[in-house]
Image (tube, rainbow, N blue to C red):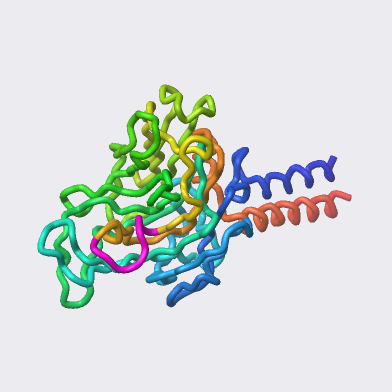
Amino acid sequence: MFARFLFLLGSFCTAGFGSVTLQQADSFWKFDGGASGAASNAQIVDFTGNHTAINATRLSWNTAVPAVSPGGGAPQDTLGRALSFDPYVTVAGAGTTDDTTAAATFQVANGAVSGSFSVLTRAMWDGPVLGEAGVTANDVPGNYWLLNNGLGGNGIGFLFGLLGNADGQTARLAYYTSSGGSFGGTRSLTSTLAITKGVWYDIGMVVDMGDGNAATLVDNSVTFYLHGPGGLQMQTVTGIYISDVTTAAPSTTLTVGSESTGLGASNQRKSFDGSLDYLAMFDVGMTQADVQAIFAAPEPSRALLLGLGVVGLLLRRRRVEV
């Protein structure tokens, strides 16, 4: 009986609180490569071992993660640090949508997903991109993309991130997919779920292709999840266009932190300025219960240590009783 209990406890420590765990993701970056300073490609490690980061630019380990997230989870690394994205405007544009911006990003050559999938992260947004010393940014609030999943050129992928509100202090979760391909349906979606700059949130997006056919729009859906200081919020929209490998394959390249990399006055402006504790991508559409369980789950090594502590107490008790 006791041996069976140990087996079940081990399963609990491995699997966490839900039927799906971060360790089962197709890609899972814990962002635990350093305690301070600039972040390099070698430090941005996919926990699954499936993907290698390239082209890391303007990233650092200079932001601490709260001990407990809004959803109840602990930081997903032993150092308690986040990967910070630090884009900046180098030249203010004459208009309100043409600032020259140095994007903060990293890329993964084979990291894109398609069809039904889920994206989960713990994030803090620092607000619209600011200018470097002596430069005052001129752009009005726009999109700040966390992910570009294979969109660009002939790649019909998707973007996931934020649309800034006019106040410059808040932004809403947003999804966009290319207008290419032969199918109709909604291709751009901004949720009603808003975040405030300088605040940590558990964030998720689940894209479900329903019957497995992207052309059947009626059962295609996008669900946004946002867990902040006020608790969990969610919003589902159906009839959404979804790219999939058989009808409109995306590029295989995943860009994290902006729509485009490098320096420019085009899609580089749509950079995320803020920090991520972790980023996980699943090739399945997750349930609400699974999403909430991951938001509340402890970091794996902490769960294991907790479980071992319980085992130690039980063993000690058994010795006393014998």
Residue at 23 percent across and 74 percent down: it is: 132
Residue at 82 percent across and 41 percent down: it is: 4
Relative to the observer, which residue lies in front, 80 or 154?
154
Q: What's drawn in magenta, residue-wise?
A: 257-265
Q: Residue furthest right?
A: 322
Query: Which quadrant of the figure has residue 180?
Result: top left
Which percent across, then down, holds residue 246? Answer: 53, 36
Q: Is residue 318 left or right of residue 90?
A: right
Residue at 53 percent across and 54 percent down: it is: 111
Relative to the observer, which residue lies in front, 189 or 112?
112
Which percent across, then down, holds residue 209? Answer: 49, 31
In the rendered image, residue 48 lying in the magenta stretch gets the answer: no
Residue at 42 percent across and 71 percent down: it is: 60
By secondary structure, the bulk of the magenta-drawn segment is best described as loop
Q: Is residue 79 above or below residue 11?
A: below
Relative to the observer, which residue lies in front, 272 or 213?
213
Which percent across, then down, holds residue 216? Answer: 45, 24
In the rendered image, residue 262 lying in the magenta stretch gets the answer: yes
Q: Is residue 289 above or below residue 41?
A: above
Q: Is residue 99 left or right of residue 214?
A: left
Q: Is residue 75 left or right of residue 183?
A: right
Relative to the observer, which residue lies in front, 230 or 98?
98
The N terminus appears in which quarter of the rendering? top right
Q: What is the number of callouts on the image?
A: 0
Which percent across, then down, holds residue 193? Answer: 31, 40
